[in-house]
Amino acid sequence: MITRLGHIAIRARDIEATAGFYRDVLGLREAFRMHNLPGEKLGSVHIFVGPSQFIEIFPGGTEEFTPNQQTIGYSHLCFEVDDAAEVLEELRKRGAPIDAELKRGFSRCIQFWTHDPDGNRIEFMELPPDCLQAEANKRCTEEK
């Protein structure tokens, strides 16, 4: 059965700028690049998030997609962090756009928001023990 989320794929207007944002601003590592055939144009850049977890970036995006509260489909990417306040300050120093400051979410998680060069919304979320996600992690892990 399903063991984890493997990757999220996005199409970028400028693959180098988008890969650079995830690598240089967010501090993630570039794992590898793929070409359809040796010597051909760049087909994708894979950014390492954690074991078997990647952001897959494809080139050639030309049409704008603006997710909002009414958009069907993709809404945002979320990274879990140990200390949201610390990550927020580090990203601010690196020049990341901050779309929503640190706050306690409806689920009692601690969160803030940014976006990549293509406008893809990114949430950063800390899970204190009393938040719904932490409670669910404990319950669902015990039920396995």
Image (spheres, helix red, strand yellow):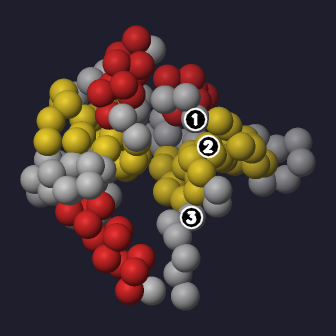
Q: Which residue is mark 3?
A: 6
Disc 2 residue type (three-letter): Ile
Q: What residue sits 40% from the left and 21% below the top?
A: 91
Which mark sits nearer the N-terminus, 2 or 1? 1
CB contact under 8 Å: marks 2 and 1 = yes
Q: Position of residue 135 (x, y in %)?
A: 26, 66
Check the picture and name the quadrant holding the N terminus. Answer: bottom right
Residue that protrudes farthest toward the right in the picture: 38
Check the picture and name the quadrant holding the C terminus. Answer: bottom left
Disc 1 residue type (three-letter): Leu
Q: Which residue is mark 2?
A: 47
* Picture layout, residue 3 above or below residue 123: below
Crowding at dot 3, Cα within 10 Å, few <14 / some 14-19 / many 20+, comes out as some
Q: Which residue is mark 1?
A: 28
Crowding at dot 1, Cα within 10 Å, few <14 / some 14-19 / many 20+, comes out as some
Q: Secondary structure at mark 1?
A: loop
Q: What residue sits 40% from the left and 32% below the top?
A: 116
